[in-house]
Amino acid sequence: MATINGIGFSDATPQKYENFKSVIQPYLLIYDKILGKHRKYSNWMDNKFHYFDITSGNGRNPKTGDMGSPLLFIEEAIKYKNKFKLHLIEQNIENCESLINDICNTFKSPPNIECVIINGNSVDILPSFFIGKKKKRFGLVFADPNGVKLDKGITPFDLLRDMSDCGCYSHTDYLINCNSTQIKRNRGVKTVAGFEKYDKDLNGYMKDVGKKYWCLTEPRGNANWTMILATNWWELIKKMKSSGFYWNKSKKGQEILNKIN
Ligand SMILES: C[S@@+](CC[C@H](N)C(=O)[O-])C[C@H]1O[C@@H](n2cnc3c(N)ncnc32)[C@H](O)[C@@H]1O
């Protein structure tokens, strides 16, 4: 995989964006209906949809210039009346600057979207959202690291497990772009770059994440990238089948896992 400004890309990247769009489009439609209903009478939940992109990039595929995850999300979210709060985390300052410019130039202050771009390491920053008593939040976290680990031996699975421990995120789902070949290759390796070993297969990592259900796509490219959606809501898993996401315990899900694990 080649990188520009720390943003990895390969021939499998365009398919990643297709998978992302195929989740976001039906997903926001479903949550728009739910949020619309709850907003009228609920005081136990936040009235905004929270989107966390913990590896935001600079807004574009560095090779093709196609829109990346934060822009694709906004492009879809502006179609709705409900309010969205975006938390976009990116460790590279130049990528953050490009992202700000790109968002401002592409979308002219959409009234339903509040967007905060945070320059820093999501391993340090995301946990700051777990502190304090909050209303329950409907939302989605997207993790799209270049490899399996984010930093300092920490994977998105580790970070998201801590998020699940925080009750207000029981209605926040997780979308993870996962390099399954790297997990497979490194399994059993004692230390990698001085950090804790990779000791689990994908099932093991997903068990730790703290959501009841998950589904995944067919693998893409040499690294067998697969996109995984994890949630506590069974209906969502059923609905995502038409977007090419298969429940891990279904026949098709098992076939994929046998191929990549
Ligand atoms: C594969 S790119 C993400 C691309 C983006 N999701 C898209 O669709 O265009 C990974 C990005 O995550 C950033 N990154 C990697 N580890 C990070 C971390 N621990 N905290 C914050 N950003 C990180 C890298 O600088 C890089 O820009």
Image: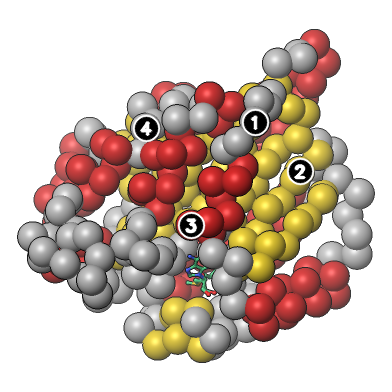
Please determine whether, in this image, residue 198 is positioned above or below residue 136: below
For the residue marked with disc 1, what is the amino acid? Gly
Residue at horizontal 62 percent and vertical 61 percent from the top: 89
Q: Residue furthest top?
A: 41
Residue type pointed to by label 2: Phe
Q: Given the image, on which type of amino acid does mark 4 rest? A: Gly
Identify which residue is drawn at 79% across, 21% down: 39
The quarter holding residue 33 reads top right
Q: Is residue 209 left or right of residue 138?
A: left
Q: Position of residue 78 (x, y in %)?
A: 80, 51
Observer-side mark, 1 or 2, equals 1
Q: Quadrant of the N terminus?
A: bottom left
Q: Secondary structure at mark 3?
A: helix
Tell me the residue at 36%/57% (across/down). Answer: 154
The residue that label 4 is drawn on is 210
- Residue name at image x 50 percent, y 79 percent: 7
Q: Earlier in the sequence, mark 2 or mark 3?
A: 2
Q: Are marks 1 and 2 in contact (CB under 8 Å)?
A: no
Note whether residue 199 is visible: yes
Labels 2, 4: front one: 4
Name the residue tied to disc 1: 132
Q: CA distance from mark 1 to mark 3?
A: 18 Å
Is residue 109 shown above or below 129?
below
User: Label 3, label 4: how many angstroms apart (C-alpha)?
Assistant: 18 Å
The reply to whether the residue tagged 3 has its Cβ within 8 angstroms of ligand 1 is: yes
